[in-house]
């Protein structure tokens, strides 16, 4: 296409410079000689073809922008979901407190009923939960295991979609697993657990973990830190996603 335009443009110049394109003695359109009309047609051809080429190029750019925009919106949804799922471990307490299957949104974890229950829940007790059939580990131990697993999946999502995320948002998302709440959880696992055996009504003996009463507030603080951090990041992702949906890609006219 480019070569064709160059040839036509060159012919138009040659005709205009060396050819007799008009008659000075005539009037109106009669002044334009056949060679002049040829020059005009060549010029029009250059204009039409170049405009068509520019329009097609514009459409390709717009389509590419729309595809990238769609990928970013999809990435935002996937990252938000992965972020929410990092707190899946709290489902154990959520079900114990509210008697529902699980939370769907991070905002569900800010339910006053749940927060009040969270601060008074004995997280050292063995879990009796239909979702953990046969499991007798204490709540906090299960929460830690689930949290680490979900954080691993979250990190994998970030690595996969990092090129689509704004640099400042990506930095905050990468720092999320280093939140003080997760650190408190891990440190508690090291410093505050003590093994013992606990007799149960069924006559069986299960491993049990003793948490000093003064440390229960410590765990509640860890969970609240995790919820607060996740909610803050979720809001930032939502704002970015909203801006993407409201933005317009390049428009091509004619």
Image (cartoon, rainbow, N blue to C red):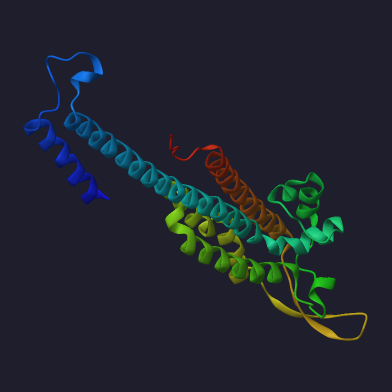
Q: Residue furthest left?
A: 18
113 left or right of 179 in image: right
161 left or right of 117 in image: left
Q: Which image quarter: residue 40?
A: top left
209 left or right of 189 in image: right
User: Is any atom of residue 128 visible in this view?
Assistant: no
Please provide percent x and percent y for residue 249: 47, 40
Looking at this view, is 253 or 38 the one in front? 38
Please provide percent x and percent y for residue 197: 78, 81
Please provide percent x and percent y for residue 82: 61, 60
Q: Vertical placement of 114 versus 21: above or below? A: below
Residue located at (44% from left, 47% from top): 65
84 left or right of 16 in image: right
Residue located at (75% from left, 62% from top): 91
Residue located at (22% from left, 19% from top): 30
Q: Residue furthest bottom?
A: 204
Q: Residue furthest right?
A: 201
Looking at this view, is 218 or 168 the one in front? 168
Q: Which image quarter: residue 103?
A: bottom right
Residue located at (48% from left, 57% from top): 174
Please provide percent x and percent y for residue 44: 28, 34
Q: Vertical placement of 251 versus 75: above or below? A: above
User: Is any atom of residue 218 visible in this view?
Assistant: yes
Q: Tag count in the figure? A: 0
**Quarter the C terminus occupies:** top left
């Amino acid at each position: 296409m480019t070569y064709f335009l160059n040839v036509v443009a060159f012919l138009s110049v040659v005709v205009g410079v060396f050819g007799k394109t008009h008659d000075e003695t005539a009037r109106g359109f009669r002044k334009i000689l056949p060679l002049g009309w040829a020059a005009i047609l060549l010029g029009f051809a250059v204009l039409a073809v170049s405009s068509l080429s520019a329009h097609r190029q514009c459409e390709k750019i717009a389509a590419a922008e729309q595809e990238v925009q769609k990928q970013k919106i999809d990435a935002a949804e996937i990252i938000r979901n992965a972020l929410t799922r990092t707190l899946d471990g709290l489902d154990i307490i959520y079900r114990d407190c509210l008697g529902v299957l699980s939370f769907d949104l991070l905002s569900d974890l800010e339910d006053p009923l749940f927060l009040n229950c969270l601060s008074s829940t004995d997280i050292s007790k063995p879990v009796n939960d239909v979702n953990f059939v046969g499991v007798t580990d204490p709540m906090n131990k299960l929460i830690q295991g689930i949290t680490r697993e979900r954080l691993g999946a979250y990190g994998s999502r970030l690595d996969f979609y990092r090129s689509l995320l704004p640099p400042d948002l990506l930095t905050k998302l990468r720092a999320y697993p280093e939140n003080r709440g997760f650190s408190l959880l891990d440190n508690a696992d090291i410093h505050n657990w003590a093994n013992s055996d606990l007799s149960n009504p069924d006559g069986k003996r299960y491993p049990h973990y003793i948490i000093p009463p003064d440390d229960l507030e410590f765990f509640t603080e860890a969970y609240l830190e995790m919820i607060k951090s996740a909610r803050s990041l979720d809001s930032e992702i939502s704002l970015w996603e909203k801006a993407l949906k409201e933005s317009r890609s390049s428009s091509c006219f004619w």
